[in-house]
Amino acid sequence: MKNELDKKIISLVDLTSLNVDDDNNVMDLLLKKADTAMGKVAGVCVYPNLLSYIVPKILPKKIYPVSVVNFPSGDKTILEVVEEVFFVLEHGALEVDLVIPYKELLIGNIQKVEDMIVDIRKATKGVLLKVILETGELESDEMIMLASKIALFAGADFLKTSTGKTSVSASLQAVEIMLNEIKKHNNKVGIKPSGGIKTRDEAILYMELAVRLMGSEYLNSKTFRIGASSLVDNILKDNGILLDEGEKNY
């Protein structure tokens, strides 16, 4: 039973490496964790410049290439972010994770946030758009609720909590707020808790929350992802699988 649950968790992971010094060697190590003795992850999320290296290696395995725009600060202009979108799409991304200009939201500039998401939604037509709210930097439950509503009405396919680059990342409280807004708006929109989720037990808490609020059918990779870098490692180790065993698939 535990083994099956661990396989389920892995199948919902966006395996992530977003460090400024990432290179092809780091990507090789990452990709060895993407298709393991316990199954494949849902997606692999990397910086735009590394897409061309990973895409040919993961697409045949039906693992989604994911990249980020306006990352991590959310401070770029709409034109700059549109250019980033064109770049990642040209280099094979099938999913785009967009950081909203959350600092603008904090000073009440709702229109700028809405305009960013609407324009990026147009630029990403045909691919999955995950909108990162950076919930740990928002100052209240009401602000998380507002950010969720803006993203939903602007056309997000997923709401995502965090970049993983701030002191507070995913939290159950934030995800519950986001899920409640999704439920009111369109329960086909997905959720992606991201940042700081390292263990099976932590992942299960988010999964249980999603099932409680949205139903068991919501717990699939089309509507539920976990953004993580060490979660897969830890699950494999818990099951007595050394990375060398996982590497046999690559």
Image (tube, rainbow, N blue to C red):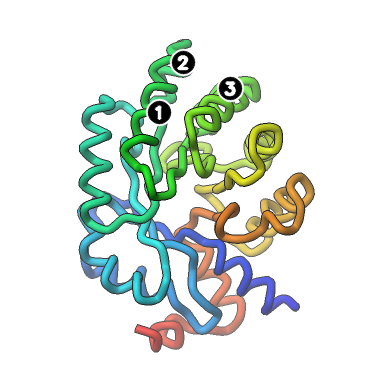
Q: Are marks 1 and 3 in contact (CB under 8 Å)?
A: no
Q: Nearer the viewer, residue 129 or 212?
A: 129
What kind of residue is marked 2? Ile
Write down the residue under mark 2.
110
Q: Residue at x 41, y 41 (%)?
A: 165
Q: Which of the labelled discs sits on residue 146, or is there none? A: 3
Looking at the rendered image, the quarter that the N terminus falls into is bottom right
What kind of residue is marked 1? Val
Q: Secondary structure at mark 2?
A: helix
Q: Is residue 121 above or below residue 54?
A: above
Between discs 1 and 3, the one toward the N terminus: 1
Q: Are marks 2 and 3 in contact (CB under 8 Å)?
A: yes
Q: Is disc 3 surrounded by few (<14), some (14 to 19) or many (20+) residues within 10 Å?
A: some
Q: Residue at x 51, y 30 (%)?
A: 151
Side (left or right) of 85 relative to 187: left
Side (left or right) of 93 relative to 91: right
Side (left or right) of 117 relative to 56: right
Q: How many marks?
A: 3
